[in-house]
Image: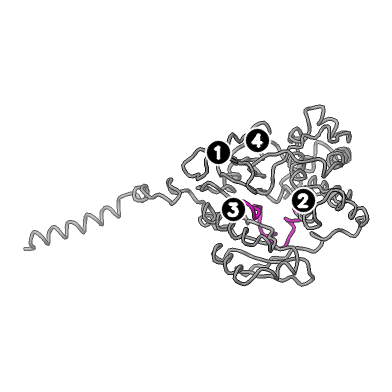
Amino acid sequence: MPSSRTRFAIFLVFSILALLIFLPKEKISQSYHSFYGSARPHISQSKPNAAILMLIAPSRIHQATLALLNVENRFNRRLQYPYVLFTANEEEYAMITEEERQKIDWITQGRATLGTFLRSTPIVESFTGMVAVVTKDSWEIPDFYDKSRVEDSFRNIGFSSGYRSMCRFYSGFFWKQPALLEYEWLWRLDTDIEFHCDIPYDPVERMIEAGALYGFIQINEDAEWVQPSLASNVSEFLSSYYSSHSSASNAVPGVALPPVPADVNHAFVWHGMNGVEKALKGEGGNGEWTRMCMYNNFEISHRSLWESQIYTSFFEHLDNAGGFFYERWSDSPIHSFGVAMALRKDQVMQFHDMGYQHQGWAFECATIDRCTCLKEGAAADFDDQGYRWFNTSAS
């Protein structure tokens, strides 16, 4: 006859087994909380096909290292998106020391690819086995540019050749790079950034759920004195493109956007209906341009936007006009013009809850417990009035 102690032990074992078998698994995990301080976030079984890209100058390698650490700590150690990091030329690549590469490797848990692109046989440092190669024509001044006009522009407007090459690269080439071709979603970040808030969700997944193709943080006005002929060139393109394409064009099979997208948001970049009408007639200029830009130092985009017929034709028109080096046309207004002519309002998403800051500039600090910023200083009374321009937002 078993003792009472033995009977109790047997009863306890069977009770535990019964709980494990019959209690729903959801009950067991209900009390689990992540380090973000909220309920464990849902992570879909099929993660979006996305990569984070960054252009790094050797003089900013420490800055880039801090930015990558911030990105990892705030969200990407959980999301596990790969990084593709570029340098502008062989000399800059060689200036990044082995110690600095090892730090990047450790911070990103081996998910970073580092490469350069101004040589026939690219130098590549790949922590994950991928190859980061950027084509030479993405960066150098095209041969068809008038070199004397380019030199005059450097003297009169300023800004280095490297800066202008960067603007041209992001305007018309970044998504074409071999190291990025396998990715559908492209998440650009700069080196001089900081996220003041933890991000407990996947921004790319949130965009997919909303049917958005372009995501950004902040709207600002851009300067026209460095790009005095940009708006008139954009208007010239719109008139030419719309006159040669039927407004009733349908999407081409296998392509996300039709040649002439309908119900787009021209009024984001042109003042009122009168400004839009003048722009579409080829009569728009700086007087009609709102100068409103989605600052693309943070930018999440689906490659179908850049590969669309209207955007690729738009960039070719601007590149042939020469304004990237005759003036200092910036990728931020060019992307904004492109988004306005290619997407509807509901296909664009603004994020309000990330506490994202660029170069110490003014930023939006959300009043939520997962943010370490305060609504003072650069975050005091921030309002870029993004709601005036777009219907979709994430907050």
Please report the residue visible at 61 percent of the width from the left and 68 percent of the height from the top. 101
Determine contact: label 4, label 3, CB under 8 Å: no
- For marks 3 and 1, give the one nearer the viewer: 1
Three-letter code, disc 3: Pro
For the N terminus, which image quadrant?
bottom left
Closer to us: 268 or 178: 268
Q: Which residue is mark 2?
A: 171
Q: Position of residue 103 (x, y in %)?
A: 57, 66
Figure quadrant of residue 64: bottom right
Q: Which residue is mark 4?
A: 384
How many numbered circles are shown?
4
Which segment did they paint magenta?
170-193
Q: Earlier in the sequence, mark 4 or mark 3?
A: 3
Q: Position of residue 124 (x, y in %)?
A: 69, 70
Three-letter code, disc 4: Asp
Please report the residue visible at 52 percent of the width from the left and 46 percent of the height from the top. 197
As for residue 171 lying within the magenta part, the answer is yes
Q: Earlier in the sequence, mark 2 or mark 4?
A: 2
As for residue 116 lying within the magenta part, the answer is no
> In the figure, 30 relative to 141: above or below?
above
Q: CA distance from mark 2 to mark 4?
A: 23 Å
For mark 4, does the 10 Å Cα neighbourhood hold few (<14), some (14 to 19), or many (20 or more) residues?
A: some
